[in-house]
């Protein structure tokens, strides 16, 4: 109800804050899922309604862009930013869904470390998006997101190397490799989101 009375420009910032809070919760749940002793489908099922809420926010922003002529910054940047944030959630849900689809019971080594890094990235992104219309120290948080992506990339490469050395079953190897690739892609999307925020800050400084 309150959002109805906000100025149109302010609504965009509210949407960014709302969607990143949901993405952070998805990252936390995903890390909980991959860190458990056995993969718990009940944990995975918590993600779908949250991801659905993220889709709703993304669509709401896009519809507003199509109606409004005045936006707080470039329309293309708003569209790209909301889509990148939404993409993070889509990938996290997809990675967990692969475990269920493939009936994987063995742990995917490295997945818990990468998801822990993604959770840290989302926390930094949440801070960066808090006052996007009041540029201050967001570039610091954005650089932290990019540093964390490098860390996730290192874990991914080490995990992949270990997987190819130790896993003898080619089908299981393929399944685990795909999960690791998806999680590494989620970390990449976090970095891409940070890059867009920096671009917006520079354009509007």
Image (tube, grey):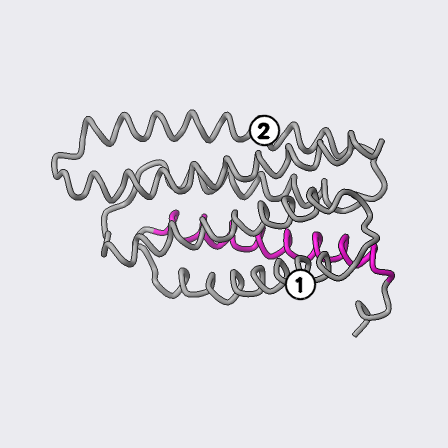
Q: Is residue 89 rendered magenta in the image? A: no
Which circle, 1 or 2, is nearer the viewer? 1
Mark with earlier residue (1, 2): 1
Q: Residue at x 53, y 39 (%)?
A: 189
Task: Give residue 162's position: percent from left, percent from top.
Answer: 26, 27
Q: Which quadrant of the figure contains the N terminus?
A: bottom right
Whole-percent x, y for residue 151 in the image: 49, 27
141 vs 115: above or below: above
Main secondary-structure element of the magenta-colored stretch? helix
Left or right relative to 121: residue 70: right
Disc 1: which residue: 60
Q: Disc 1 to disc 2, how far (Cα)?
A: 28 Å
Tag 1 and tag 2, C-beta contact below 8 Å: no
- Specify start and end residues of the magenta stretch as a single range: 7-36
Left or right: 3 as drawn, with respect to 32: right
Asked if the magenta segment contains residue 22, the reply would be yes
| Structural crowding at the residue carrying mark 1, measured as other residues with C-alpha within 10 Å and reported as few (<14), some (14–19) or many (≥20) | few
Q: Quadrant of the C terminus?
A: top right
Name which residue lies at 63% across and 29% down: 144
Depth order, front residue of 197/128: 197
Residue pictured at 47% horizontal, 61% vertical? 47
Residue 100 on image: x %, y %: 29, 58
Q: Quadrant of residue 25?
A: bottom right
Residue assigned mark 2? 146
Could you say which disc has been placed on residue 88 in the image? none
């Amino acid at each position: 109800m309150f959002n109805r009375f906000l100025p149109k420009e302010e609504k965009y910032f509210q949407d960014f804050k709302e969607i990143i809070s949901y993405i952070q919760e998805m990252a936390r749940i995903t890390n909980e899922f991959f860190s458990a002793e056995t993969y718990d489908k009940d944990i995975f099922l918590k993600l779908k309604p949250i991801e659905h809420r993220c889709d709703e926010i993304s669509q709401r922003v896009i519809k507003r862009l199509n109606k409004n002529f005045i936006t707080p910054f470039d329309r293309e940047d708003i569209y790209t930013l909301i889509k990148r944030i939404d993409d993070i959630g889509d990938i996290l849900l997809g990675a967990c869904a692969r475990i269920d689809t493939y009936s994987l019971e063995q742990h995917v080594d490295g997945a818990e470390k990468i998801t822990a890094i993604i959770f840290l990235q989302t926390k930094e992104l949440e801070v960066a998006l808090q006052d996007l219309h009041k540029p201050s120290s967001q570039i610091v948080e954005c650089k932290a997101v990019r540093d964390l992506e490098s860390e996730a990339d290192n874990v991914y490469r080490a995990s992949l190397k270990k997987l190819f050395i130790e896993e003898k079953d080619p089908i299981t190897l393929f399944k685990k490799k795909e999960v690791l690739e998806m999680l590494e892609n989620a970390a990449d999307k976090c970095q891409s989101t940070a890059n867009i925020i920096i671009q917006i800050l520079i354009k509007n400084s």
